[in-house]
Image (cartoon, rainbow, N blue to C red):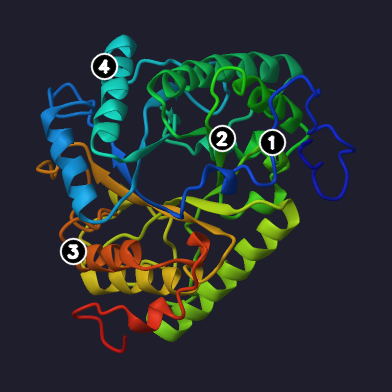
Amino acid sequence: MVAPSPPGGGVGWGRAPISQPLPTARGWHDTGWRGARGITIGPIENGYHPGVGYGSEAYGRTLAECKRAGAEWVAITPFGRTADLQGRGIDRTFEVPFDENRAAVRRAIEMAHERDLKVMLVPHIWVESGEWRAKIDPQTDEGWAAWAKSYGDFARTWAKVAEETGAEMFSAGVELRSWVTTARAPSFGALLRDLRHIYHGTITYSGNWDDVDRTVILGDLDVIGINAFYPLAEHDGDGYEALLAGARRVRDKVHALAETWHKPVLFTEIGYTTRPDPAVRPWEWPDQMAHVKVDEDAQALAYHALLAPLLDEPDFAGFFVWRVYADPDDVSQEAEWGFSPRGKVAELVMRDAFAAPWAGDGTRTAGWGRRARVPGLPGL
């Protein structure tokens, strides 16, 4: 089946020659998987913390915790780095030598499979200047061609790892707005089609929540991926009903996007920090905050509100919680008000959601959000 052209035009630039592997409208459904109940496990590559990153005994304990929580998937996130937003190229070495990191990631995938967990491999780009990868812009045609080649080499390297280890899903990019929402997008579409000659599993792309409607490479994917840090409310102090109304608007966006492209939507990242009103600006990074009040109930309330309507949406293919770390005993990776739900009230919400039947499984949930019992959360 030929992938659909982008809505509103593009007359088939997203179509691959018939000799190439193609995504299909039922690419996700044909796997036979139910909705993805996933947790992202972040790496610990820092030289000050040897022996506790991907593939280690400590990482094995994190996998065991994910399994006990009801997860059926984990996401693994190796990084490459670029100096700044000029997009002059990607260094595949990130804190540890690349060959060492690649071997660790391979072992991490194997260990997940040994525990009957499916794996989504999600290579990320770290911008050393501290700026957001979505704004990378090499400016000139020549600069973009060089960036596309460098990024393509990076993506193919990790796609090969995904293929060799049997990772079930591969995200070909994360938040590359300046590329996939602009006239530069055809070169990313070409990369996606090229990756299918290397990797034969399910391919997605992790778009940002506020630009996915303008992302024109969705026809080349098997399932639409979104880093779903949608604001659910506008004002601090808004209660559960306001958050729930915001989540219903998110569900409507998911449904509309899936119906437009004839394929389901997967939240490749969801998360809320452990502080008051985290659903107002959920994308705010904990490292940029200081002296924050820790509020586990507010984090859990945001999770609950977001998931309540989505689990009853047939076009919703699941979610990956952002995130826990490879060493479950390491508390140095983020502040206590950070994203991790581990050992917090939000973990109970996550566990209840994982255990519930979903419409995306082929069964209606009939109001999970009204039935889930979460100690300490008033009014649920």
Q: CA distance from mark 3 to mark 4?
A: 31 Å
203 up-or-down from 68: above or below: above
Query: SS at mark 3?
Result: loop
Q: Amino acid at mark 1?
A: Asp
Residue at x 74% of width, y 56% of height: 260
Between 28 and 104, the one nearer to me in the picture:
28
Q: Nearer the viewer, mark 2 or mark 3?
A: 2
Q: Earlier in the sequence, mark 1 or mark 3?
A: 1
Q: Amino acid at mark 2?
A: Ile
Q: Earlier in the sequence, mark 3 or mark 4?
A: 4
Return the x and y of residue 236 as percentages of the image width and height.
40, 77
Q: Nearer the viewer, mark 1 or mark 3?
A: 1
Marker disc for residue 96: 4
Q: Is residue 43 visible?
A: no
Residue pointed to by mark 3? 344
245 up-or-down from 207: above or below: below
Q: Assess disc 2: are there few (<14), some (14-19) or many (≥20) residues with their C-alpha within 10 Å of its C-alpha.
A: many
Query: SS at mark 2?
Result: strand
Return the x and y of residue 95 as percentages of the image width and height.
28, 20
Q: Earlier in the sequence, mark 2 or mark 1?
A: 2
Residue at x 24% of width, y 77% of height: 374
Q: Earlier in the sequence, mark 2 or mark 4?
A: 4
Query: SS at mark 1?
Result: helix
Marker disc for residue 203: 2
Marker disc for residue 220: 1
Q: Earlier in the sequence, mark 1 or mark 4?
A: 4
Residue at x 12% of width, y 34% of height: 58
Q: CA distance from mark 1 to mark 4?
A: 33 Å
Q: Do labels 3 and 4 touch, CB within 8 Å? A: no
